[in-house]
Amino acid sequence: MTGNEDPSDHLTVTPPKTWATGLPAVAHALEYSLSQTSVRRTALTLLNVNQVKGFDCPGCAWPEPKPGRRHRNEYCENGAKHVNDEATSRRIHADFFREHSITELDGKSDYWLNQQGRLTEPMVKRPGATHYVPIGWDEALGLLAGELRALDSPDRALFYVSGRLNNEAAFLLQLFARAYGTNNLPDCSNLCHESSGWGLRQSLGIAKGSVSLDDIHNSDLIFVVGQNPGTNHPRMLSALEETKLRGGRIVAVNTLPEAGLIRFKHPQKARGVIGRGTPIADQFLHIRAGGDLALFQALNRLLLEAEDAAPGTVLDHAWIEQHSTGFEEFAAHARSVSWDDIHAATGLTRAEIEQVHQRVLASGSAIVCWAMGITQHKHGVATIREIANFLMLRGNIGKPGAGVCPVRGHSNVQGDRTMGVWEQMPQPFLDALGREFGFTPPSHHGLDAVRGIQAMLDGDAKVFVGVAGNFVRATPDSTATERAMRNCRLTVQISTKLNRSHTVCGETALILPTLGRSDRDVQASGEQFITVEDSMSDVHASRGTLPPASPQLLSEVAIISRLARLTLGEQPAIPWEEFEADYDAIRDRISRVVPGFEDFNERVRQPGGFNLPNPVNQGTFPTPSGKAVFSRNAFEMPLVPEGHLLLQSLRSHDQWNTVPYALDDRYRGIHNARRVVMVNPDDLAELGIADRAVVDLVSVWRDGVERRAAGFTVVAYPASRGSAAAYYPETNVLVPLDSTADVSNCPTSKGIVVRLEPAPTA
C-alpha cells in the first residue's frame, strides 16, 4: 500500500500478544520511517529527537531521563513513526488542490489525507468554491484579521489549541485572544484530561501530577489505571521496568489485557533482544468499564477497617492531621459503600481486591498513574478525587516514590495550559497578564471545546481558528461537529499536514502551513528554539534540525504575531514584531507573568532545562482551606440496559491521536482493518452475535437521536464483561455532544451505551 492508495479492510485476526516492543518494534519503526523519507533524514531525526541539543518528540509527553542518563536512541516505536511522519519528504503543492476538490478530499480516509505529505503554501477556499487555491501570507492574514474585526463581539471567535503547540506560541495565542477580548480558548485537554485537572485541583489545589521520573523508578507500588503504555506512551515501559528491577510492584487495572503491561522487551538491552524481557504487572485487575471509582472506594474501606483492627499501624495520622481536611466525613462515607455495589461495578472478586490491599499494606510508597480510561467517564472527576483520598490515607503525597501521575498523551498539552490556554484561567493569572501588557483581560469564562461546538451550531460563534491538531476528528458527535464547522463564516487551520479539519470547513476557509517540531526555525535575530513542558513539569528547549519543508512556511509564533498586529493595531501596545524576531523576548515576558518561570531564558538553557515547583511536594496545598481535601464521592457506576454494551474508544497500535499510520493493531492481533469492535465471547453468546459478524454500532442516549457507526466486524476478544472496544475517530460519531463528565465537561468517550445491530446486507 502506497501513500496514494486509500486502504480497505481485509481483516485477519491473530492471538493477542503477551509482550511488547523488542526487535519487531525497531523493525516497524524503521520500515515506516524509510517509507516516508530518506535514510539520511531518518538518521538525522532519530539521533536528535529527545536529545539535549535536539528537538522534543511531538508525540507523547512522557519525560526524558536527566542529561547523562539518556540513551543515544531516546525514542520509542511510535515516537519514531511520528517524528518521521512529520519529517516526510512528501509535499502538497497548489497543483494537488487543483486536482482534488474539497468534496473529493472529504471522502478520503484519515490515513490517505495524512499520507499526502507536508503542506507547503497558504491556501484559501472562497465562498461557493469547490477547490482551495493559493493565497499570499499578507492577504490570508489580512482576511482573517478583517473577519475578526468585523465580528460584533470577540466572543463569536474560537481559538482552539492542540498539545503540539510550544510554550512561546501558546503564550502569544492566549495573549492575543485576551487582548482581542475573549477567553474562548478551547484546547485538547477539554477532550482528554480535563477531569484530571478538576479532580486534582479540588483535592490538592494544583491541576498537575506530583511525581518525577525518579519517583517512578523508586516507588514500592505503582497502579497503572485505564491506560495502555505500550501503545500510547511506550517509553513509560522502560521506566516501569526500572521500577521492577529496583524491587517495586505494579498493579495494572484495565478493561483489556495490554501486552506492554504483561511483559516488556527493552530493545536497547540484551534481555529485551535475546531474552524474555521483564514481566511488568504483578497483578492484573480485569475491571469493568467505569468501575475504577468503586475499586478505590473498596480499597479505602479496607484501609480504614485495617486501621480499626490495628490502630496506629495503617493510616498516616500525622499527615492527615497536619495536611488535610474532611477526613471524618470521608471516612464515614467510605465505610458505607457496600460490597454488592463494588462487585457489580468492578466485576472483581473480593479476593482480588483483598490481594491488592495486601500489596498496599506492604508498601512504604505508592503512585497511581492514569489516563483517559479514567477521565472520559461521567464520574471521572469523582474517581480522581477518590484516588487522591486513597493516596492521602497513607501519606503518599509529597514524599519520594509517591504521588499522583496523570499521564498526558500529547507533547505539550500540559505546557499549553500552564501558558494560559484555558477558558477559565484564574484571576491572578489574568491580573498578572494585564499588568505586564497594560490592558484589562476579560474575566468572564470562555467556551471549552464542547460548548464551542454548540456555539457554532447555534450560530453564536462565527470564526474558528485551530492551531495544530485535527479538531473535526478529535471531537465527539462527529455529525454535530461537522455541521457546526460548516455553519461558520470562516474556519482557519494552522497545520503541518492535511487532515479532515481542512475538508470540513466554513463558508470561507484558510489553510496556513507552519513549521514542524523537527524543522529549523530562523527569524530576524537568528536561529530560534522553543520550549515544552512534559507530564512531570519538566520544561526544556527544543531545536529543530531539518530544513523547513518549504520556504513559504511560517512558525506558529510568526503567524500569531502577524495576525495580532493586523487585528489589534497599536492597542494595546504589545511588541508583536519583537516577539516574532526573537523568542527570548517572549520568554522574558513569560518569566514575569507565569509563576515558576523566573529567569526563564537562563534556566531553560541549562542542559535538560528545569522542573517547575509543585507546592504539594513542599506540603503546601493551594485550596481554599490551605489543606488537601478528603472528598465524599457518591458511589456511581454506568447503567447499561439488558442487551447493550458499554463502548470505549481507543487507539490502535499503529496510530497517533486521530492519525492511523497503518491498519494494524498487532499487539491486540487485529490486522488490516479498523472498523472492528472487540467484545467478550460470553457477551457475544448472550447477545446471539457470531464472531466475525458485521454489525452497526448504535448509541443510546436520552435525546432520542440515533447515532450510528455502520459496518463493524465483531471480534471475540478478552474484553471485560459488558464492555466493547473500538477505534477512534471512527466511533466518535457515537459520543453525544452533551454526554460529558460531571464538573469537567469532558466527553465520555470511554462510557457510551451501544447496541449491536446486524448490518444491512447488500
Image: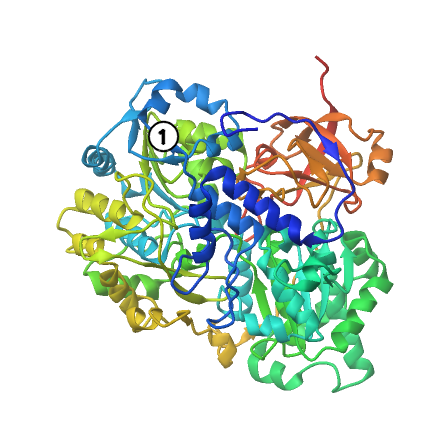
In this rendering, would 275 be left or right of 93?
right
Direction left: furthest residue:
570
* In this view, 162 is above or below 150: below
- Name the side, left or right, on which 571 lies relative to 122: left
Give residue 596's position: percent from left, percent from top: 37, 72
- Dividing the picture into quadrants, the one containing residue 526 is bottom left
Residue density around tag 1, few if under 14, some if 14–19, many if 20 or more, within 10 Å: many
Picture coordinates of residue 295, whole percent (x, y): 74, 61
409 relative position to 350: left or right: left
Q: Is residue 115 above or below residue 443?
A: above
Residue 5 in picture, x, y percent from top left: 53, 25
In the image as oriented, which residue stretches furthest toward the front? 40
Q: Residue furthest top?
A: 762
Quadrant where the N terminus is found in the figure = top right
Q: Which residue is mark 1?
A: 488
Q: Is residue 378 visible?
A: no
The amino acid type of the residue labelled 1 equals Cys
- Image side of residue 594 versus residue 622, left or right: left
Can residue 341 be seen by looking at this rendering?
yes
Vertical comparison of 163 with 216: above or below: above
**Secondary structure at numbered mark 1:** loop
Where residue 88 sits in the image (x, y, percent)?
43, 40
- Quadrant holding the C terminus: top right
Residue at 71 percent across and 75 percent down: it is 247
Closer to us: 225 or 213: 213
| Numbered circles on residues, count | 1
- 552 or 163: nearer the viewer: 552
Using the image as rendered, state which of residue 652 and residue 227 is in the foreground: 652
